[in-house]
Image (spheres, helix red, strand yellow):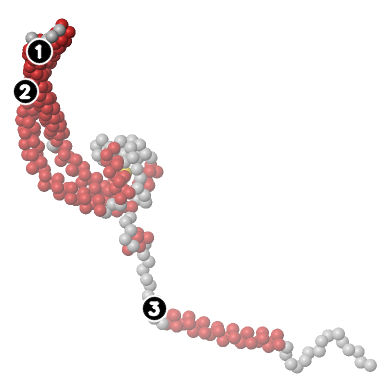
Amino acid sequence: MAKTSGKPVATSKPSKLAKKAVEKKVVEKKKVPAKEEEIKEKKVGKPVSKTPTKTKRETAEDKGEVTIEKKLIALYSLQQIDSQIDKIRIVRGELPLEVQDLEDDIAGLETRIDNYIQETVSLEKSIVEKKNLIKDSLALIKKYEDQQMNVRNNREYDSLTKEIEFQNLEIQLSEKRIKEFQLGLEAKKEEIEQLQKVLQDRESDISIKKNELDDIIAETEKEETELIKRSDENQTYIEDRLLTAYTRIRKNARNGLAVVQIERDACGGCFNKIPPQHQLDIRMHKKIIVCEYCGRILVDEGIVAKMS
């Protein structure tokens, strides 16, 4: 008998796995020329249109967003306009305050005079009442004296005598009150006369001051109205949060400066030194930076140059 070897005998028909591998190779060969054709078409074909890339600042402007730099320019220009308005009002000096004080004095004097006049009227009424009371008392005394002539006993006579004494005391008291009221009335009239003289002086002073103030206002009114109009227009470009902060800083500051420039490495409002890192941040225009000492908004020379 012939010996059979352990190795598998190769058959003429290929297996299923071999068929699949051959098919994959054929498909890959077909795909390769397709890719090469696409690459050739790209090289030979129409040039691809390149869209220009926009920077972040341009996209922010397209969307309607206001950059920090524009906000700083708007704030600084608003500060310059308000400073010019303040200078015009300083030219007027203390005349508006003096006129206001005189008006308050005149109003106070007028009220005091009115109160004194009312008091004099009430005193005159009291004097008339006391005089009428004296007349009534005299009439009663005469009545009681007539009754004394027709009394029947001593008791009636004594009671009428007491009534007459009481009425005499009432007359004396009324006369005393009349004298007091007359003295008070004379004092009030004297005070009214003095106050009226003071009132006339105040009215003459206020007329002079008002004429001076009107002359100054007539000279600067046109310029002031134009500046106020420009200030209102600039306020529309600033958001409400920044505008409220600006007005708050202006009220707290003595010189009315809320936005100041860096001068000699120091704040233009309080003149305290600013660290170099803060100066660099201010020049970058990435955020609004305030002075850590006085709270004023700080800008660099670049903002000032762009605004001018």
Nearest to N terminus: mark 3 or mark 1: 3
Rounded to the nearest angstrom, the CA distance separating label 3 from label 1 is 142 Å
Q: In the image, what residue occupies the spot 30% across and 52% down?
A: 239
The vertical placement of 218 against 23, above or below, is: above
Residue named by callout 3: 47
Crowd around label 2: few <14 · some 14–19 · many ≥20 (10 Å): few
Q: In the image, what residue occupies the spot 31% across and 48% down?
A: 242
Marks 2/1 in contact by CB < 8 Å: the verdict is: no
Residue named by callout 2: 193
Residue 186, position in %: x, y? 7, 18
Q: Residue furthest top?
A: 154
Label 3: state its secondary structure: loop
Label 1: state its secondary structure: helix
Badge 1 amino acid: Gln
Residue 112, position in %: x, y? 13, 27
Q: Is residue 187 visible?
A: no
User: Residue 159 lies in what quarter of the image?
Assistant: top left
Rounded to the nearest angstrom, the CA distance separating label 3 from label 2 is 103 Å
Residue named by callout 1: 147
- 153 or 255: nearer the viewer: 153
Nearest to N terminus: mark 3 or mark 2: 3
* 58 horizontally vs 81: left or right: right
Q: In the image, what residue occupies the spot 7% across and 16% down?
A: 139
Crowd around label 3: few <14 · some 14–19 · many ≥20 (10 Å): few
